[in-house]
Amino acid sequence: MRVTFLGTGSALAGGDRVQTGLLIDGEEDGPLLVDCGAGVLQSLTQTAVGYAGIETVLLTHLHVDHVSDLFAILKARWLAGEPATEIVGPPGTESFLETMLSAYDYLREKVELSVREVGPSEFDCAGFRIDAVQTVHSITTFAYRLDDGECVLTISSDTEASDEVMDLADGSSLLIHDCSFPDSVDVANHPTPTQLGDVLAGHPVDTVVLTHLYPHTNGEHEAMRNAVGDAFDGDVLIAHDGMVLDV
């Protein structure tokens, strides 16, 4: 399974980071685009898949920094001769898309959308077997565990450090986890590195990658890695835009 970090930033612009987006390719599964904040369309142009190759988009939640490039991608796919796209996401996804189409009414006859709302359950998507749990965030948000039959990847999306997400990640080769702020920031709905490390402790995960990084983390990356690593025995990496990991 190959993971490309299209965007590793947050709702605040951070210079060298665009907003959230992940491209997932399995040996026989995918490609699957998970979230598509501002800048992800441009990041896709730097990949072999490109936006024309994205047939399925999986949304973790509907905050703007996770969905703001969705209609730009849909329009680009239509212009590239690929009007059909499957959108999978939490409850409210269908209503969100309908509202957006009312604003961009000319796209109704151009794009062909297949919409599926999912809950905290198991389902198939782009060939992957996916298990979802709800995270601790300000709106309904899902963490996803992806299994392609060869390896397991877990994506936390936005969340405080929680036992539910850690249990979901047990046995994962790679856990991509929100770590938006350093320990010096008192924050809700996201974890600090020490909070994340404490909840990760003892869970069988090979590598955790810290992402969804606010500008507050600039200059703090090594300290953040160390804070997680003080309690967690696996490898700890800091995500950056364009990063590619083979799992």
Image: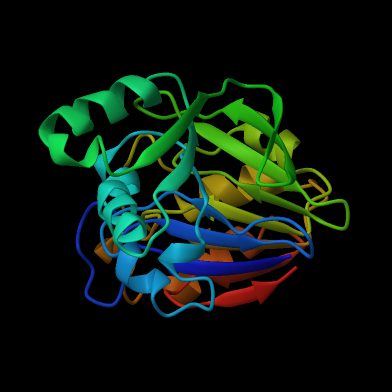
The spot of residue 77 in percent (x, y) is 36, 58
The quarter in which the N terminus is drawn is: bottom right
Outermost residue toward the left in this view: 103
The spot of residue 185 in percent (x, y) is 30, 50
**54 vs 114: above or below:** below
Position of residue 242 in the picture relative to residue 120 (left or right): left
Image point (33%, 77%), residue name: 219
**232 vs 60: above or below:** below
The spot of residue 165 in percent (x, y) is 64, 36
The spot of residue 215 in percent (x, y) is 26, 65
Position of residue 246 in the picture relative to residue 194 (left or right): right
Image point (42%, 23%), residue name: 140
Q: Residue 198 occupies which quadrant of the picture?
A: top right
Image point (46%, 44%), residue name: 85
Image point (37%, 72%), residue name: 43
**159 vs 20: above or below:** above
